[in-house]
Image: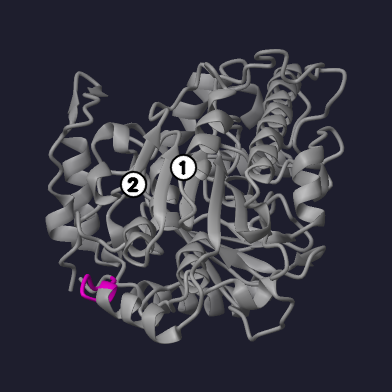
């Protein structure tokens, strides 16, 4: 399988040297867990996020930014390698033993170290093997979903930033807004939101009391996240290095709510992306280009003085940051494999400015992720939400047992309730998106375009079950890296 060739690391470094640019720009990459663009700067009326709003005013807000796969490990692997999960191998969660095909896969950390950056991480990495990412500084490696000692993040960041005057790359990974949705920790936020303060997210399609309660608690997590990021940015400013630091903030995928995380809908794939670069980026921009997380590695390479090779599927965001209007991608792609063996249901998506196609690779079979999510977090709604004849009920029925293709007009139906795949008036766009999806799968050598490899992966997943449950083991030896990485 052709993935980004390991020898290209040398090409990257040679490009950096030949470019002759000063690679002293620091990079601060901030990620949050399980949240879409539910920020006041994105127009969310029930949330107050003044610190991220200020970052957006002083930088660039990307209105249409998307992850490659709506799962933690998978998305983060794309951020750091510039590859889709089917290219790098991190198709499922690291806590279940899923891992990249090759330890030596080039990544942001290795490349930046080679051109003189100190590298650090605060918070979880959640990609296997961790040894593939040789950070110089590591703190608070646990997921910390209990939200213990949250002030430690900016303290550790300050220690790292002040330790040397060399250019640095620091990745700070916050636990909010991952489940459990804890409304208040250490008086953050000062006034947690209640069911009377909010309405459920529109893509949920309903206004049940349980949806309101979970939405309110989720929004409280978002306000706490904003406070913590504000403290981190204050720490950067106090260090005296803010004016020479590229700051990137993003969510790793959508909220853990119905039709969000673990689904190929916009609620799972669309995330906030805000970038600030004092004196370099044109402040106050709101960009509408289709941006993918595979674009972040090429961006970091160019900031460090290098240039990404054309074999990477993403492209540098620097022209957009500077206010230029380059020819940009017309189509954006994403995928789903699984979190754990409990929700294996491969899917592929493509969208353009208006329409979106979802290809379900196991059509006509029930998506196990549907019942898993309902049983785990919404048992009161499991039956009621799927009843009825309306578009919302139909969307949940479709989510539970999808057809081979789903087609949505995102301009008229932004929350993807009305499937147009059988509408004869949309046959032309359906066929066009099918062709574009097939071309992307060939271009990126997607192994699951081969039915025999999909069957082999499915069999390996099913073999982990005993008495109806798979054994959860972070040290499990999976064989898929051997046969998927060598797909013809």
Can you give x and y, in whole percent of width and height, for residue 319 in the image? 64, 78
Q: How many marks?
A: 2
| Above or below, comparing residue 277 to residue 76 in the picture | below
Span highlighted in magenta in the image: 4-9
The answer for how far apart the CA atoms under marks 2 and 1 are is: 15 Å
Does residue 454 appear to the left or right of 32 in the view shown?
Answer: left
- Disc 2, SS: loop
Q: Which mark is residue 163?
A: 1
Can you give x and y, in whole percent of width and height, for residue 55 in the image? 75, 50
The answer to whether residue 387 of the structure is visible from this angle is no
Image quadrant where residue 381 sits: top right
**Disc 2 target residue:** 135
The answer to whether residue 151 of the structure is visible from this angle is yes
Sequence-wise first label, 2 or 1: 2
**Towards the viewer: 400 or 472:** 472
**Towards the viewer: 384 or 254:** 254
Residue drawn at (63%, 86%), measured in percent from left and top?
Answer: 327
């Amino acid at each position: 399988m052709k993935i980004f060739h390991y020898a290209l690391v040398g090409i990257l470094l040679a490009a950096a040297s030949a470019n002759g640019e000063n690679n002293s720009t620091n990079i601060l990459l901030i990620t949050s867990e399980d949240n879409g663009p539910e920020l006041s700067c994105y127009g969310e009326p029930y949330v107050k996020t003044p610190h991220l709003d200020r970052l957006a005013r002083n930088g660039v807000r990307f209105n249409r930014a998307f992850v490659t796969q709506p799962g933690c490990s998978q998305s983060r692997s794309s951020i750091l390698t510039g590859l889709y999960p089917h290219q790098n191998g991190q198709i499922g969660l690291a806590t279940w033993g899923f891992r990249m095909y090759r330890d030596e896969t080039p990544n942001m950390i290795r490349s930046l170290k080679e051109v003189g950056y100190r590298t650090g991480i605060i918070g979880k990495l959640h990609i296997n093997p961790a040894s593939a990412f040789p950070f110089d500084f590591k703190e608070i490696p646990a997921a910390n979903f209990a939200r213990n000692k949250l002030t430690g993040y900016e303290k550790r960041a300050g220690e790292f930033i002040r330790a040397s005057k060399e250019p640095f790359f620091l990745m700070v990974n916050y636990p909010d807004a991952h489940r459990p949705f804890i409304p208040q920790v250490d008086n953050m936020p000062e006034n947690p939101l209640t069911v009377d303060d909010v309405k459920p997210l529109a893509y949920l399609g309903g206004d049940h009391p349980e949806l309101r309660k979970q939405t309110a608690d989720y929004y409280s997590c978002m306000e706490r996240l904003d406070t913590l990021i504000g403290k981190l940015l204050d720490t950067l400013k106090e260090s005296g290095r803010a004016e020479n630091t590229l700051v990137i903030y993003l969510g790793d995928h959508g909220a853990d709510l119905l039709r969000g995380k673990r689904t190929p809908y916009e609620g799972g794939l669309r995330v906030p992306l805000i970038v600030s670069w004092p004196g370099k980026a044109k402040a106050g921009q709101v960009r509408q280009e289709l941006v993918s997380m595979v674009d972040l590695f090429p961006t970091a390479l160019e900031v460090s003085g290098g240039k990404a090779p054309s074999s990477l599927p993403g492209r540098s965001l620097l022209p957009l940051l500077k206010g230029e209007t380059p020819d940009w991608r017309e189509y954006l792609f994403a995928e789903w494999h699984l979190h754990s063996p409990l929700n294996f249901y491969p899917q592929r998506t493509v969208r353009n400015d208006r329409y979106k196609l979802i290809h379900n690779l196991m059509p006509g079979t029930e998506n196990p992720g549907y019942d898993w999510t309902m049983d785990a977090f919404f048992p009161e709604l499991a039956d009621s939400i799927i009843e009825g004849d309306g578009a919302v009920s139909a969307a949940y029925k479709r989510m539970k047992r999808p057809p081979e293709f789903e087609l949505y007009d995102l301009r008229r139906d932004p929350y993807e309730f009305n499937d147009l795949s059988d509408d004869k008036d949309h046959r032309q766009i359906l066929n066009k998106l099918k062709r574009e999806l097939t071309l992307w799968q060939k271009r990126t050598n997607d192994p699951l375009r081969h039915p025999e490899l999909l069957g082999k992966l499915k069999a390996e997943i099913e073999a982990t079950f005993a008495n109806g449950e798979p054994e959860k083991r972070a040290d499990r030896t999976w064989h898929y890296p051997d046969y998927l990485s060598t797909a013809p």
